[in-house]
Amino acid sequence: MASIEIAGLNKRFGTMAVLKGLDLSINDGEFISFLGPSGCGKSTLLFCIAGLEDIDEGSIRFDNKEISDLGPRERNIALVFQDYALYPHMTVRENIAFPLRQQKLAEATVDKQVAWAADVLGIEALLDRPPAALSGGQRQRVAVGRAIVRNPSVLLMDEPLSNLDASLRVRMRTEIRRLQKALGITVIFVTHDQEEAMVLSDRIAVMKDGVVQQFAPPMEVYSEPANQFVAGFIGSPQMNFLPANLCGGSSDQILGVRPHDLKPAARGNGGLTLSGELVLIEPAGPFQFLDVSIAGHVVRATCSDASGLSAGQSVILSARADAVRYFAADGGTRINQQFLETESRIHAV
């Protein structure tokens, strides 16, 4: 296992800066997710840690040892790819054993480690099958087994669940987290799926344009976003944003409130109160989403019972004062302030 220190890391492709002065400190045994939209640099950062990409400036240290100039094999890392990368002409047993045989270990040691990995992942019955005879989830387990079989210091995973269907993704992320806890291994997990990152991670590094916007535990990223980008990227549905001056606030601020905190109300509750026209009701199982037009802006709220509501009618929405967030309009930086008005009301126009 290993702790990881990344300091001042820069990476360019030609004249294009892909990673810009990154600093990250990852503890031994942590499960870390790199989260962000396509093109933000998360996979490039993973490949720099793996040694598959050279860095232009900065340093990467494992357990306080500089490894920036070491090749991938010398870093004792294991990498699980999105497409599994199994050898089709080999059985499951041979696929898992491959990295051990590359090290020219004794056959008894190879057999012991393969049996251990198969037992941990519950794939003992699959050892003599070829990859073509496996389901997507089974192939993913084999890919993980091949990665952990030689006890790497760090396990790197590049969107490993993106090829699975929704229900299988949920099961596999539970298995990956269980496995990481059992082995105590340091894991870095790349994903664009914020739900995966929230469920799996000890901490999340939210990235945009080659810069880490926030590095914190999942609920801190959700509840106390560092800026408007993080607030909008984390959470489903996305946080509502309104010009703060529509609510009696400053004209150089943006107000944010999550749909799950904004609900229909008979009157203001001393926090944020908005009036508008109900545009659409969207059933979502145990609750309904309400799309409400407010002064030319459509915001989303939730309610447990939409009976008595219909499109076109006027509604009042309310949120607790402590659920409201503010961001600077000229860059989106979070402003730490409470909603001070006892009641601000916007009327739809």
Image: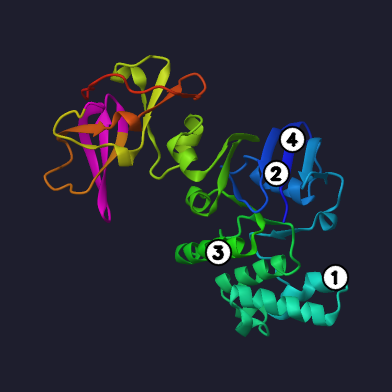
Residue type marked 2: Leu
Query: What crowding class fits label 4: few (fewer than 14 Cα within 10 Å), some (14-19), or many (20 or more)?
Result: some
Quick check: is 272 in the magenta stretch? yes
Q: CA distance from mark 3 to mark 2?
A: 25 Å
- Mark 1 is on which residue type? Gln
Q: How is the image coloured?
A: rainbow
User: Which of the marked residues, 4 or 1, is nearer the chain's N terminus?
Assistant: 4
- Distance Cα–Cα, label 2 vs label 1: 27 Å
**Residue visible at 26% across and 55% down?**
286
Identify which residue, 42 or 116, lies in the foreground: 116
Decide: is 129 above or below 33.
below
Residue, disc 3: 178
Three-letter amino acid code of the residue under disc 4 = Ala
Task: Magenta stretch: give its range.
Answer: 270-298
Magenta stretch contains residue 21: no
Residue denoted by label 1: 102
Q: CA distance from mark 4 to mark 3?
A: 30 Å
Q: Is residue 95 visible?
A: no
